[in-house]
Amino acid sequence: MKYFFYILIALLGFIKTEAQNNQHFEEANALYNEGKYAEAIDKYMSILQSDTHSAELYYNLGNAHYRLNNVAPSIYYFEKAKLLNPNDKDIENNLVYANNMTIDAIDNVPEVGFSKLIKNITNTFSFDIWAKTAVCLAFVYVLLVLLYYFSYSSGKKRITFVMSIICLLSLCVALAFAFNKFELDKKNNPAIIFAQESQIKAEPNLRSEEAFRLHEGTKVQVIDTVNNWKKIKLTDGKIGWILSEDIKILKDF
């Protein structure tokens, strides 16, 4: 009975929080439509403080910051919305507009050859889909093996044998792509620069020589961390160290 009471209290608290968040969301949208973008941002942020996350919430935050010409926050929230809903065209389009406000022009070194092909195929599906496909293929393989052993006809045995081999090979391929997708996702650690201008150092200390400079809104990949420094990599291949306080990690929710 005591545990039921605790569950009931938690459920009522959740319902109350959801109701408050919905109210704040509607109020924030109304403020946005009235052109009160700063006030709308405060309302949207109050929802985030309750540990509630959604693509729509981040999208609206990005729009409000964009209206105020806040370069880094608008890009940051559009990128977070894209992480939660990668196929949304409105998010993609508004992100393009926001990126046009950035100063840094960084070339994108394209991948070529076999590695590009493998990466493109891997990114066709999420890790979950590759993993579920592998599980389904494993189940089908077991069924085919059982059919092979319990079949009396030589014709059926040949068919089930060939199909089981094909299924086993497909299973291996699906597993390989699943593990590759897992590794790609683990290495993918994007961040947005929030400092108006940041000196990128050659080594993780203030006495190190400056490698180059970046400005607010630029997207980077974080590849290492040492104390209060982040090692970053740009799409053109440049690498350097930036103070942790100058950037925000996109995968932090």
Image (tube, rainbow, N blue to C red):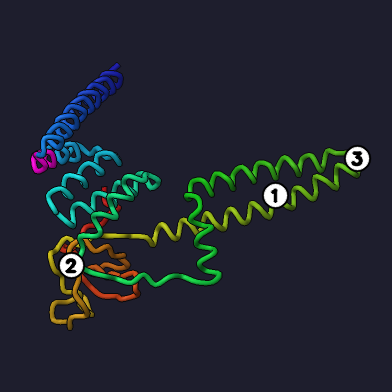
Quarter of the rendering containing residue 137: top right
Magenta stretch contains residue 81: no
Label placed on residue 148: none
Q: Quadrant of the N terminus?
A: top left
Q: Image height check: is 163 above or below 219?
A: above
Q: Image height check: is 209 above or below 165?
A: below
What residue is shown with label 1?
167
What residue is shown with label 3?
153
| Residue 103 in the figure: left or right of residue 129 | left
1 or 2: mark nearer the eye: 2
C-alpha gap between disc 1 and disc 2: 51 Å
For marks 1 and 2, the one nearer the N-term is 1
Q: Position of residue 58 (x, y in %)?
A: 25, 43
Q: Secondary structure at mark 3?
A: loop
Label placed on residue 215: 2
Residue visible at 24% across and 23% down in the picture: 15
Characterize the local packing of mark 3: few (<14), some (14-19) or many (20 or more) Cα atoms within 10 angstroms: few
Range shown magenta = 36-42
